[in-house]
Image (cartoon, grey):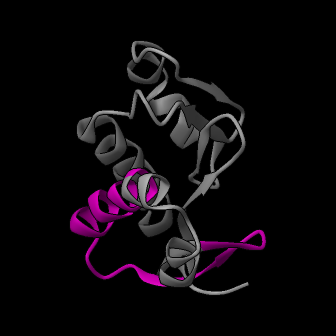
Amino acid sequence: MGTVDDYLAGLSDDDRAVVGHVYDVARARVPDAAQGAGYGMPALVLDGKPLLAVVRAKAHVGIYPFSAAAVEAVAGQVDAVEGSGRAKGTVRFHPAHPLPDDVVTALVDARAAQIRG
């Protein structure tokens, strides 16, 4: 397992653009987040706890905020995006229909609030 930057470097140009953008939005919102790991995935880490991982799967991009409550906090916004969905601790979207930045920001804010209490 490497860093977020290592993971991005191994993706195709198109996938790197989509996945990298989610990370860029998260980093802009929480600039003190560092690269680390969460559940074996390269992730952004805040105060020693995993904040967010973004992984390209065969049919979708998965965003893992390591919190079912953070996913529920943005459920309505996610469900409104074509081709997106959610599971207990994951938000999924099709690369052709990326999540709007405000949805990513809301997800990151919800998780950061949990971490920082």
Reply yes or no: does residue 66 show up in magenta: no
**Which one is in front, 75 or 4?**
4
| 86, above or below 43, in the image | above
> Residue 40 sits in which quadrant?
bottom right
Residue 25: x and y in percent read: 28, 57
Q: Quadrant of residue 31?
A: bottom left
Residue beneath the point at 37% across and 57% down: 17
Which contiguous range is marked in magenta?
Answer: 18-42
Q: In this view, does 8 lie above or below 93?
A: below
Q: Which residue is drawn at 33% across and 35% down?
A: 103
Q: Nearer the viewer, residue 85 or 83?
A: 83
- Quadrant where the C terminus sits is bottom left
In the image, is residue 51 above or below residue 17?
Answer: below
Whether residue 41 is in magenta: the answer is yes
Residue sitting at 52 percent across and 61 percent down? 12
Q: Say whether residue 53 is left or right of residue 116.
A: right
Residue 106 x, y percent position in the rendering: 33, 41
